[in-house]
Every structure is written in structure tokens, then in C-alpha cells.
Image: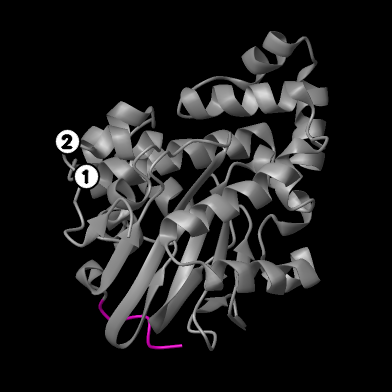
Amino acid sequence: MPSPGAPFDWTWVDVAVPRRPGRLPGVSMAGFRHRVPAPVDIAMVAHPSVTLVLDLSDEGAIACDAAGLRLRGSFVAGLLPGRLRVGGQNGECLQIRLSPVAAAAVLGASTELTGTVAALEDVWGRDAGRIEDELRAAASWDERFTIAVDILGRRLGACSPVDPEVAHTWRRTLTSRGRLRVDGLADEVGWSRKRLWSRYRSQLGLTPKRVARLVRFDHAAHLLAAGHTASRVATETGYVDQSHLHREINAFAGLTPTAVAAAPWLAIDDAAWPTSSSARNSEEHGVRCPSSNHHQ
């Protein structure tokens, strides 16, 4: 991997997004074509999704480094994968973000993946190589998105291993940006707090409180990237004070608010993930990637 200090410029990357985003619940995707002058890497900032990166280059142009584990080629990053860096030089990849509820159906291993990074082949077996070949052979990003939607749709159509009550409280946590109390969520679905806690841990791999903290951190990180001050972000996102915000950002990203605000991983979000709630919130103040487009 290149050194962590290597700079990254999004004008080196062409971005493609589906013409009709949001066709599958809990699924968003974007295509990236890298044409960088030298190997670079960027640090992933934690967000409330399981991430699939399908390397569509000819010779494994994508590499990742997570807590000493080095992988080349397609991989899956579970919720809170730790300090993960993703790098490479020239090539193409399809990045898919799955809500934890969707990931449980699509991957069948969401709990085991929480806090880890794994080669896609270790998760999908022989299907991983077949899917890569099919996507690589497609004539356009539009065709690739159609193929991916079909593959993921079949998996989502199977019986979900997540209880409807857990799925409901996940959605409520996301739409409230992590501001709802666990007791209130349990009451909404007619469960005890203990039962909700237990089902979350077994089905999503995190407790309801940890999920709420992650969602709130994600909102705060995007506000910082959009140019808001740390003091304002702390107030708007419900942290006790600015010190509380600092502690949470350090806990989830190992960074200061200033460093999160400048993180390359966040700088492309409003272009690559235009239907995400974080992108909508930062649309007015966010950074637009001049090389992005809706299809190629």
C-alpha cells in the first residue's frame, strides 16, 4: 500500500451512478474509474452501511489494508471495520452500500462481518468470480448497474434473517439520525428493551445504542465535511457539547473534527451517493466532484 499521507484528488476519478437510484431497499451503488498518476490510498470513514467493493480491473488494481490485514481485489467491509485504507492506481470498481438489514439477506453473514473486512470470495464463494466476470464484460456502467440490481434483487427476494421489528427500529434510527431512545423504539414494536438489544446483537452485529451512535456520527461527519463548525455540528446533532463530539469522532474515526472535515472519503459523497440522506443534507454546502456523471 502507498503511504497513508499520499494525497488524493477526485478529479482523477470518473464516477457513474444509476439512472434510477433506489430501486432496491437499503441498497445504493456507484461506479468508479480510476486514472491516477501514481498509487494512492484513502482512509474509509465509518458509515452505517456494509460496503462491497467489486474490483473490475484486469489484475486486482484495488487493495485494502485493515488493521494489518492486506487484501487485493474485491472485498466486503462490515459495519465498523476499523481503520481501513483503500488504494490503487488505474482500474475500475463497483462500490455497493448495503444497510445492515439488506446485508443480512444479501451476504448471509452480516453479524460475522461486523468489525471486519473479508475478501468477497470468502463471503460469496465461487459466485464472487462469476459475478466479477459478468460485470467486467458489460459494455457500460448502465449495464453493470442492471446486472448488480438483478443479482442483489434475487438475494433480497429470499427470506430475510432479520425480524420485521429489528428492520423497523433500524429505519427509525436512521431517519431520526440516531436521536431516538432505545426504550422508545422497543415500545414502538411491543418488545422489551432487553429483547430488542438481544435481537440487534444477533441479527445486525451491534447493539441499538451502538447503531444510534454510528448514525449520529455519520450525520455529524457529513455536516463537518459540508463546512459547518464543530460547535455548530455538536449542537445540531445532539451531542452534549463540543468535547463530546470530539470524543465520538475519535472513537469512530480516530480523527479530529478538522481531519474528518477534510477526509477524501466524504468529499465525493454528494456525487457518488446522491440519494443518501447525508448527501441531501450537505447538498447546499457540500463539495461537488467536477468529473462525476450519472452514466457513462
Q: Left or right: where does residue 294 sit relative to residue 218?
A: left
* Residue 45 in view here: no
The residue at 29%/50% (across/down) is 271
Q: Nearer the viewer, mark 2 or mark 1?
A: 2
- Closest to the observer, 167 or 218: 167
**Residue 217: percent from the left, percent from the top?**
43, 42
Q: Which quadrant of the figure contains the C terminus?
A: bottom left
Against 52, residue 11 (above or below) is: below
270 left or right of 250 in image:
left
Q: Which residue is rendered at x = 53% and y = 77% of the image? A: 64
Tell me how the rendering is colored. one colour
Q: Amino acid at mark 2?
A: Glu
Q: Is residue 9 above or below residue 225?
A: below
Q: Is residue 3 magenta?
A: yes
Please check the rendered image and state whether residue 118 is part of the magenta-colored stretch, yes or no: no
Is residue 37 visible from the viewing direction of this image? yes
Residue for point 29% across, 46% down: 270
As drawn, 144 above or below 40: above
Helix, strand or loop status at disc 1: loop
Give the dominant element type of the magenta stretch: helix, strand or loop: loop
Residue where numbered disc 1 is placed: 226
> Which amino acid does the dot numbered 1 rest on?
Ala
Q: Position of residue 255 (x, y in %)?
A: 37, 61
Q: Nearer the viewer, residue 232 or 247?
A: 232
Distance from Cα at disc 2 to Cα at disc 1: 8 Å
Residue 240 in percent (x, y) is at 38, 30
Instruction: Name the residue tied to disc 2.
Output: 284
Q: Up-down: is 46 above or below 67?
A: above
Give the residues drawn in magenta, as a range.
1-7
Q: Secondary structure at mark 2?
A: loop
Label 2: how many Cα within 10 Å (few below 14, some 14–19, many 20+): few
